[in-house]
Every structure is written in C-alpha cells, then in structure tokens.
Amino acid sequence: MKLLPDRPSIDFLRKEAKDLLVVLRDSRPDTSLAEAQRALAAEYGVRDWPALKAEVERRVADVPAAPDGLVDELAEVFGLGTVTAPAKPVMFTAMGRCWDFTTDRGRWLAVTVYDWITNEQADLGARLRDAAAAVGVAAPAPARSPQGRLVEDVRGEKWRVHEWLEVGPAPVLPVGKALARRAGALFGTLHALEVPSEDPVHGYLTYRRSGEEWQQLLGRAWAAGKPWAEQLDERLPTFLELQSIEFAVRGSLMLCNRNLIPGHVRQGSGGALIVTEWDFAGSLTPELELGSALTHWVMRPEVNVKGVVAFREGYGEVRKWPELQPDSFAVAISGWLNWAYNALCEAIDPEDVDHAVFAEREAVGVLERPMTRRGLEQLLEV
C-alpha cells in the first residue's frame, strides 16, 4: 500500500494520476483519467477518487504535532545541535511517524524503527549502504550519535536520524518501462557488489504458519466483528496453497537490502532512484531477492508484463540475470504471508489510533489483492 504523507496535496495527487494514466495506456490505450484516478486511490488504500480527496482534506485539517520536546531530545541524543524551527510531520509508517526538523547544523529526518533493529543490525545496513554509495547509488546519509550509534532510545522508542534529502515521490504501481528498467539496474548494481554474508536467512523470511494458526486468526476476526472476516475465510485456501512452494537456498548468500520495495525508494533529479531504507539488510541469494523484488515492483496490482521485461533488461545491463525457479519466490511468500498475518492481527487489536488506521487499510489490501501461486507462475512465464 502506498502511503499518504501527513500533509498531502490534492494537486500533487492529480499529477500522479496523470502520470499513472500514461503508464496504464501503455497496455490499455482506452484507459480514462477517471480509471487512473480510481487505480491511484486503490494504491493509497481507499475505494475511489472522492474518498482519496476526502482523506486529503481530513489530513490537511488535522496535521499531527510533535510531542513537546521530542525533537529537542533527538537533537541532543544524536548531537545535532540546537533545534531552530518546529518539527513537521512527514508520514506514518508501520514503524511509526517520521519527523522533519531543523537545527543549527542542518535539516534532518527522524524515524522510529522496529525493536529488532539493533545497532548491530543498523551497522549491517550501513555497511551495504556505504558500499552502494561508493558505486553511485544515491541514499541519505545516516547520523550517528556522539557514542557512534545509529540507533538510540528516546522516550521508550528506538530512533534513527538521517540527513534530509529533497526527493520526489515513491513510485506508483504499475511502474512504467523506464522506471522498471532503472529498478532492475539498481538491483543488479547491489548484487554486483557481492558483499559476503555468513549469517543465515532471517527467520521472518523462512517461517510459515500452520493452517491451525490461520484458523485461529480467522476466529479472532469473527469474534472482533471485523467486516473482512468472511473475505479472510475465502482467502485462506489461497494462502495455504502458496505455502506449497517450499523454502530452499540455491547458491551462495550475500548481503542484500532485503526490503528494496517501491515504498523505500524515491525519485530524484533526472529520474534517479534514491534508496531510503537499509535497516532490513541481511543474507539472501540474488535469486531469492529478485523473486521478492518482482512481486513488489511488477506484480501489483497485476502482473506488469512490459515492466517485467524492462526490469530484467535493466538488471542485465549490470549483471547476468539468474535462472529463476518456483522456489525463487520462497522468501517473497514467507515475507508476504507474515506481513499479511501481522497486519490482520494489528487490525484486530491495534496499538493506538494511528496503527489502527494503518493496519485496517493493510488488512483490506492483502485480502483484496492477495499474492497467489498463479500470479507467481505468470511471472515465471514472462
């Protein structure tokens, strides 16, 4: 699901819809602007264009304010000087709200991170980020605290801070051929680094829940009166069919970004792609990361045939495209199913109002446009 910023602009969304129209007409020349607007609204997790406009108006009228003294504490902990202007909200993500703030030493973006992202994990991501930056991959520079840490605890949460970069929006799906080619080249560039990694693949990307666990989740959804409980019941066979593709590792592991999704990329000057997230870095094979990448970049909302071809061509400009097999999607399957399960759990029992809104939209999204075995087979056919 594409995320709306905390201070959205309807004029910007109109431009996004027109850009999306160009991409949609590449495969369906008779696509109307109204259809493009509706498709864009779906990407933002709402039912149609009027609902998207209403959401923009709601957010403009109710802009979040930073808790008193929060950014002053962040600036002090990370040694960034004195805050010179009030903080501005950027957007709410699964990890929490991001804040834009300025000190006498520069402008910064502060983000909360998951509890499992330790300094050791952040350093792993920084290692890959630095190697990528050395060969021209654009990425914001991280701030380290005076103690040399990338992650610091402030008010009971884990925080990261980055230097502010003026960037464009995250890509809208489906992506056009030019953007898909650039994305493929980006993955090829990162894989060509061949940064070694001896750690095993993270358990989140290998763990599969049992049918009984999914049935228990369904029972919780019915008990909570969730309007999508019946839809979850209908989708469970699809989820379990995905799990018939078993996890396997073919070839040597290397250090990969592991979460280089459209939402973690911004478009810079001349269409250059800027990678904003590195904290999920860890061991994968190129085949497993490409299998996951294809499901994010060229499978949603449906298989983007021209995008698949362009993505592969872009990768091939940098590095030989590997042979993909059904089990190349094993990490994609585990990751998607675990994300879906957690989103549904959060929607049933949210942590707070912000998490409730976010999780409810994610829950509807995974149920209305689930990953399917047939969709993965179509990717392989392309």
Image: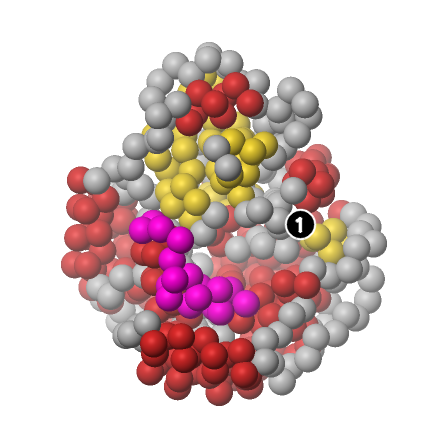
Q: Assess whether residue 81 is covered by the magenta stretch.
A: no
Residue 150, given in percent of the width and then of the height, sits at 63, 32
Q: Nearer the viewer, residue 217 or 20?
A: 217
Q: Quadrant of residue 235?
A: bottom left
Whether residue 176 is situated above or below residue 265 in the rendered picture: below
Q: Quadrant of the C terminus?
A: bottom right
Kindly identify the amino acid type of the residue bearing the numbered disc 1. Answer: Ala
Farthest residue toward the front?
223
Residue drawn at the location 66% of the way across and 30% of the way down = 149
Label 1 residue SS = loop
Q: Which residues make up the magenta segment?
A: 338-354
**Residue 212 place in picture, x, y as percent:** 54, 83
State the residue position of label 1. 281
Q: Quadrant of residue 309?
A: bottom right
Q: Does residue 90 lie above or below 68 as drawn?
A: below
Q: Taken as a whole, is the magenta stretch helix, strand or loop?
A: helix
